[in-house]
Amino acid sequence: MVNVAYVYPWDVVGDPAAAERIAALGVTTVALAASYHSTRAATPFHPAHRVLDVPHSAFYLPVRPEAWGRLTPAAPTWTSPDAYLLAQSALRATGLRVHAWTVLTHNAHLGAAFPDLVVRNAFGDPYPYALCPSAADVAEYCERLVREVLVAGEPDGLILEGCGPMGFAHQSVHEKTAGAEYDPDLMSLCFCASCAPRYPADTRTRVRTALDTPTPDTLTSDTQPAQAKPSASQTNPSANITPSSGPGPGPAAYPVDVALGPLADDVRAIRVELAASLRRRLITTARQIAPGIPITLHANPDPWATGPFAALPTGEPSADVLVGNCWGDPATDAARLTRLADLCTAGQRVGAYVLALPPRPADPAALAELLALYAKAGASEFHLYHAGLAGPRRLSAMRQALEQASP
């Protein structure tokens, strides 16, 4: 069993005890953020601070202007500009392998600077945190990002998050959208200048009509999907997959299929290919630079998925590990892992992205029970979120749970 702890560079830089503390968890590998979005992070062990405000997305390796195109990532001011390298060196000194945790299209800093390159819903509203990979400049930026991570960072592995379009579900600052009861799948369909022309005629009208329709009863029978697919509403990591009770061929019908009706298959295929095209481009680049490096994808078998776990309904044989989100209902999460396992080719592995923070209890037995469930569902790697954000009780629970889960 491979155990991976997720960590930010600032968790290690400036804390001489951090690397040994993380190694003591019983993990073999650290997923160290090389590119990450804004956040406010607890740092419960750091000798210099207990809370760190990270006001914008940043690249934690030295930013070389000549390496970038139209889009250039920002450097951090809250930690060293080479924080990734400093943290990597400290972690490797304890015998840990370091994989570069690379967040791709989730970047509010660049989205605000380049509003023409962000996801826009059917009403034209921009999502500044969400770069749309259908834009050539965004796809090029992602490729350059992977190239710089591998060339300048020389990691032991590459972890790709947000390898596709982000969607509506986003835990933004003071989020105030729940009362509108928007369907997140429909609100995640992008109609930016690059995406809109790809869809069948009338797609935007159907989406807008569905979002403005109070109940599904007004939808006509010709909007029923030929084949229902899992909902992308779980792309908010804390959300569960729950079928809609609206019209359709039984209890597994979902609003996005119903709303799009006869257009659903075409729109779904366009969305899936968008994520697949970016994925293939980045993996090809990575293989050219570092042929033997293991590549991990944060993935979702749901073809409507948006967000950090991008749609991967037919698998990706060029990757080494497919990691599924396990932050919601354990049974639903386990079913998702099983679907990913079914998509794997010989030699590929499935990872479980396990939440060890609230609302999960700081209970070793409860966490070990979850790990056992995920292993039974097909996971051979546990990706623990998050070794830097967790306080003493939770770190202890992680360590004990991993001991109990080890064969």
Image (cartoon, rainbow, N blue to C red):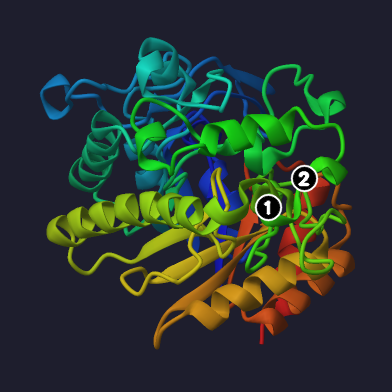
Residue 219 tag number: 2
The three-letter code of the residue at mark 1 reads: Thr
Q: Are marks 1 and 2 in contact (CB under 8 Å)?
A: yes
The structure residue drawn at horizontal position 89% and vertical position 52%, both measured from the top left corner, is 361
Q: Position of residue 37 (x, y in %)?
A: 50, 28
The N terminus is located in which quarter?
A: bottom right
Say which residue appears at 58% left-offset and 31% top-offset.
205
The quarter of the picture where residue 170 lies is top right
Looking at the image, can residue 93 be seen?
no
Going 26% across and 22% down the picture, which residue do you hit? 71
| Nearer-the-camera pick, 25 or 270 | 270
Q: Left or right of 351: which side holds 109?
A: left
Three-letter amino acid code of the residue under disc 2: Leu
In which quadrant is the C terminus drawn? bottom right
278 over 168 or under it: above or below: below
Residue at x 54%, y 14% (from the top left corner): 55
List x then y, in percent, for residue 283.
27, 58
Which x, y percent locates residue 5?
57, 55
Disc 1 crowd rating (10 Å Cα; few below 14, some 14-19, many 20+) is: many
Say whether residue 34 is left or right of residue 125: left
**Depth check: 399 or 133 in front?**
133
